[in-house]
Amino acid sequence: LSILIIGLISAHADTIQPMYTAIDEIFCSLNITSGTAYCGADITPSNSSYVSSLSATLKRSTDGKTWSSVKSWSATGTGLAGATIDESISVSSGYQYKLFATGTIRNANGVTIETAYKNSSIKEY
């Protein structure tokens, strides 16, 4: 039975998502077209009384291990609308790019309930 369970977990490892209590969804994506990086991030809380904050940093690398910041953005929002970042920036060729997002949910008193991290896939340009 344990072998069967391990096999099922391995088969679906790419679909496993962290369990959040205050975060309904967190999203992060990066696309590069003709020298322009399109950076998107979004966080949605599970309760309309929560305040959302979101930051996203576009980073670049030559080796996929060491990353340096290119540009950062931040956004806040209240209620179920959450917070959204939708930005674009010109990028140089010859690098790998990745978007790193951090989202935080706070209650009406400003107390942090939950923080989550989400990264895009690496895009080469």
Image: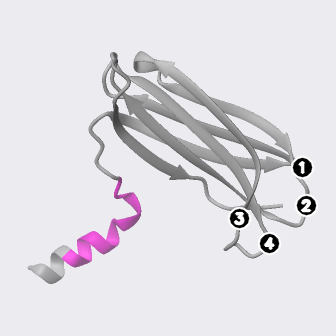
Q: Is mark 3 in CB contact (under 8 Å) with mark 2?
A: no
User: Circle 1: is it few (<14), some (14-19), or many (20+) Cα within 10 Å?
Assistant: few
| Magenta span includes 15 | yes
Q: Residue 111's spot in the image, x, y percent?
A: 34, 29
Residue that appears at 35% across and 39% down: 114
In the shown orientation, is residue 68 left or right of residue 7? right
Q: What residue span does the magenta drawing correspond to?
A: 6-17
Residue type highlighted by circle 4: Thr
Q: Which residue is mark 1?
A: 35
Q: State the residue in front, 8 or 42.
A: 42
Instruction: Classify 115 as above or below 42.
Output: below
Number of numbered tags placed on the structure image:
4
Kindly report the distance in space between the C-alpha atoms of the residues bearing marks 4 and 1. 16 Å
Mark positioned earlier in the residue sequence (1 or 2): 1
Mark in front: 3 vs 2: 3
Q: Considering the image in quadrants, where does the N terminus appear?
A: bottom left
Q: Secondary structure at mark 3?
A: loop
Q: Secondary structure at mark 2?
A: loop
Mark in front: 1 vs 3: 3
Q: Considering the image in quadrants, where does the C terminus appear?
A: bottom right
Q: Which residue is mark 4?
A: 62
Kindly report the distance in space between the C-alpha atoms of the residues bearing marks 3 and 4. 8 Å
Kindly report the distance in space between the C-alpha atoms of the residues bearing marks 3 and 2. 15 Å
Residue that appears at 40% across and 43% down: 115
Q: State the residue in front, 102 or 42.
A: 102
Q: Which residue is mark 3?
A: 67
Q: Residue 5's spot in the image, x, y percent?
A: 17, 74
Q: State the residue in front, 89 or 110.
A: 110
Mark positioned earlier in the residue sequence (3 or 4): 4
Q: Residue 46's spot in the image, x, y percent?
A: 32, 28
